[in-house]
Every structure is written in C-alpha cells, then in structure tokens.
Amino acid sequence: MQRRTFLKSTLAGSAVAVAVGAGLLTPRMVLAAWPKAAFEAKSVDDALSSLFGSADNTPSGDIKIKAPDIAENGAVVPVTVSSSMKGVDNIAIIASKNGTPLSANFKLDAGTQAMVATRIKMGKTSDVVAVIKANGKLYSARKNVKVTIGGCGG
C-alpha cells in the first residue's frame, strides 16, 4: 500500500513540475495584487486613499462587525464583517490606532456574499473600522475593542 501511495505522489509531483516547466502554471498567476502603499500607510485616511482613491465614506447601519468587546490578547482578535448591501466588491478592516492601520483587504467577485472573517493584530484599545465599497461608494461601520494587557484589564 505504501508503494502505491509513493507512486501516486511521485506522478502528481512530476505533473506539476512539467506544468511549471512548460509555463502553464506560473507563481505570478497564483499571487494576487498587493496594495503595498495602503498597508504601509500610517493613518486611516492615507490607507483609504491608497486603497480606494478617496477617504470619503458614509456611515452605514447595513454593515455588521462582530468582534469581542474586550480582547484579552491583542495578537489575535477575531473579526467578522458582513453586510446586506448589494454590489459589494471590496471589504477592508482597519484598526484605527495601530501603527499601520490597514489590517486586511478583501476583493469580492460579483454575486459573492458580503461576509469575511479573519483575525487581526491590535496594539492597543481602538476602533475596528470596516469599510465596504459597494456600487462605487464607500460605506463604513466601527466598533470599539478594548485590548487588555495579558488579560488583566490594562
């Protein structure tokens, strides 16, 4: 049985190597575009301007942020953003008081449900801001998350 598994693995690996060698499968086709300037921005407005071309956004009650009120460990803060809006093509998650505030950016295809979940790093207590681009306009919602130091209420 181990010989069959070995042969199957070798055959699959060889097929991938041939595809890469023939130029049919290239790493640049797999990797998504990365908005480097937006992730390196030092302010929320700069990050939004780099990402969307404008920092102007409208607060919306159609955006829901699910995050803990108190995060005992700022290194792994679970955040879920969802919306009932139609035409959502981008969701960005921002921790407003981080040194580099843009934590995540998700591009969505047409017809995709507007819901993302991730874990972000927060250096200190601040607002988590969700910015959604729908139908060419920017909408936002925010939720304050208190980050404790070592779970001791710092």
Image: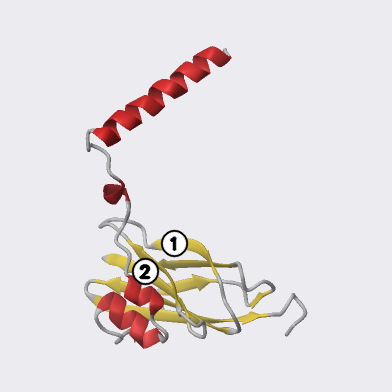
Q: Is residue 89 visible?
A: yes
Residue designated by label 2: 91
The quarter of the picture where residue 22 lies is top left
The disc label shown at residue 97, or none:
none
Do the numbered discs 2 and 1 sit on residues whose CB atoms are within 8 Å? yes
Tell me the quarter of the image containing the N terminus.
top right
Structural crowding at the residue carrying mark 2, measured as other residues with C-alpha within 10 Å and reported as few (<14), some (14–19) or many (≥20): many
Q: Is 140 placed above or below 113 here?
A: below
In this image, 154 relative to 116: left or right? right
Q: Is 127 placed above or below 22 here?
A: below
The quarter of the picture where residue 85 lies is bottom left
**Residue 7, how many percent across, how many down?**
46, 17
Look at label 2 and name its amino acid.
Ile
Residue designated by label 1: 116
Residue at 48%, 84% in the rendered image: 96
The secondary structure type at the circle numbered 1 is: strand
- Identify which residue, 25 or 89, lies in the foreground: 25
Q: CA distance from mark 2 to mark 1?
A: 8 Å
The secondary structure type at the circle numbered 2 is: strand
Tell me the quarter of the image containing the C terminus.
bottom right
Q: Is 70 placed above or below 97 here?
A: above
Q: Is residue 59 visible?
A: no
Residue at 74%, 82% in the rendered image: 153
Residue at 34%, 31% in the rendered image: 16
| Mark toward the start of the polypeptide (2 vs 1) | 2
Look at label 1 and name its amino acid.
Val
In this image, 12 relative to 32: left or right? right
Residue at 22%, 71% in the rendered image: 135
**Residue 51, how many percent across, how many down?**
30, 75
**Residue 20, how many percent across, how many down?**
29, 36
